[in-house]
Amino acid sequence: FVIKAKVKPSISDTSGTNTILSRPTATCYKPQFSIDTYRREYRVRVSTSNTMTYTASGGTVIAETWQKIIAIMNDNMLYLYVDGEKVAETSVSGTPSASSESLFIGQSNPECDSTFDFTGYLEYVEIYGK
């Protein structure tokens, strides 16, 4: 899959999470996939069929600045790009977990917690593949 987003965070949060995009599994805090900011970095997380959650994080969140974020999962690798530069990669085992849950843009699952909502602007979000 490929996930793209253009974001303009309002703050460079030093400790919290600001969810850009999330699709949870049946377990609230285990995403099928998500992109967020965490401790001034961008982060992508993917849960797979082998019950593992894989994380790739990097790049600097710059407040009040438009940034392009791209997450790619391909050939058992998870990549994260910020403004066209690869900032993280990790190997992945298994395929993304199945989920019939809703896709949330700019917020985490509101049934679980709304404290992780994105603060800023989203120009677009694109999702390709499975």
Image (tube, rainbow, N blue to C red):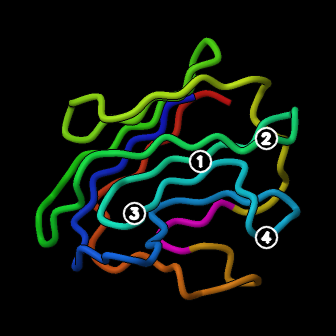
Q: CA distance from mark 4 to mark 1?
A: 14 Å
C-alpha distance separating marks 4 and 3: 18 Å
Which residues fall within the magenta stretch?
103-107
Residue type pointed to by label 2: Met
Q: Are marks 4 and 3 in contact (CB under 8 Å)?
A: no
Q: Residues within 10 Å of mark 3 (few under 14, many from 20)?
A: many
Furthest residue in direction left, as rendered = 65
Q: Residue at x 49, y 68 (%)?
A: 19
* Amino acid marked by disc 3: Thr
Closer mark to the observer between disc 2 and disc 1: 2
How many marks can you see? 4
Give the left or right position of residue 29, taking residue 44 as reference. Answer: right
Q: Amino acid at mark 4?
A: Cys
User: Mark 4 highlights which residue?
Assistant: 28
User: Under tag 1, what secondary structure?
Assistant: strand
Outermost residue on the top side: it is: 75
Query: Which residue position holds label 1?
Result: 45
Mark 2 Cα shell of 10 Å, populated few (<14), some (14-19), many (≥20)? some
The x, y position of residue 47, in whole percent, is 74, 43
How much space separates mark 4 and mark 2, taking CA atoms? 15 Å
Of mark 1 and mark 3, the one earlier in the sequence is: 3
For mark 2, what is the residue?
52
Residue 4 picture location, percent across and down? 39, 41
Label 1 crowd bin: few (<14), some (14–19), many (20+), radius 10 Å: many
Circles 4 and 2 in contact, beta carbons < 8 Å: no
Q: Which residue is mark 3?
A: 37
The stretch drawn in magenta includes residue 57: no
